[in-house]
Amino acid sequence: MLEENAIVLMRNFIQRHKKEVDLALDLTLGRGKDSNFILETYPGSRVLAFDIQEEALDWVKENLKNQDRLQVVLDGHQNLDSYLDQEVDLAMMNLGYLPGGDKTIITKAATTVMAIEKALEALKVGGLFTLLVYRSHPGAGEEVAAVEDLVRVLDQRDYRVQRIEFYNQKNQPPVFFGIEKRMKK
């Protein structure tokens, strides 16, 4: 059976592949839906979440449960390494703009690529990284191309990469990338 949409696909992908999560990264906090998913799905987990908009952090602080296991950071995801002191089990990224927010404040190809590279470096062996790359906002084409260029050349001995998209959905649905860090042989 095929997945209903990209969000369901992403969540099912994570649940099929990760049995335990100690530390996860939500690299695009937004309205906190990914952070909330992690915290509810993995009760022993902690989440380190990033956003560049105070509006996102304020909204999440007012509306999200499990605040004791969530650390929100007002900073760009490309600076994630400044906040890490251990490897991570899971990283999630939904690119685009804050739902219900200012649509002119968007993720950008250059900082997105930096964040992906640093997140991949921080992943434990067996760790997962999920990306939903939205394509309908200005600048999205450049960002999609940059992500594709980066993940296409990841060494298959180090990473397993899947790309899935919904071809016949309206309004340019996001492209899903699932990446697993492999054990070196």
Image (cartoon, helix red, strand yellow):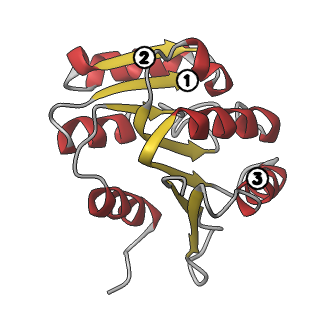
Query: What amino acid does circle 2 point to?
Result: Val
Residue bearing mark 3 = 150
Pointer 1 residue: 51
* Pointers 2 and 1 in contact (C-beta within 8 Å): yes
Disc number for residue 72: 2
- Please tell me whether mark 3 sits on a helix, a strand or a loop: helix
Q: Residue at x 20, y 45 (%)?
A: 41
Q: Say whether disc 1 or disc 3 marks the residue closer to the N-terminus.
A: 1
- Quadrant of the image for the N terminus? bottom left
Question: Nearer the N terminus, badge 3 or badge 2?
Answer: 2
Quick check: 22 left or right of 55?
Answer: left
Q: Are marks 1 and 3 in contact (CB under 8 Å)?
A: no
1 is higher (above) or lower (below) than 23: below
Counting from the top left corner in percent of width and height, residue 86 is at 43, 21
Q: Within 10 angstroms of label 2, few (less than 14), some, or many (20 or more) residues?
A: many
Q: How far is the residue under mark 2 from the one under mark 1? A: 8 Å
> On screen, 84 above or below 172?
above
Q: Give the CA separation, mark 1 to mark 3.
A: 22 Å
Q: What residue type is labelled 3?
A: Leu
* Total labels drawn: 3
- Out of 29 and 15, give the one closest to the viewer: 15
* Nearer to us in this view, 107 or 82: 82
Vertical order, 140 against 33 (above or below): below
Mark 2: secondary structure = strand
User: Which one is earlier in the sequence, the residue at label 2 or at label 1?
Assistant: 1
Q: Can residue 12 be seen in this view?
A: yes
Which residue occupies the extreme front position in the image? 185
- Residue at screen point 64% across, 64% down: 156
- Name which residue lies at 45% across and 32% down: 25
Q: Are there few (<14), some (14-19), or many (20+) residues within 10 Å of tag 1?
A: many
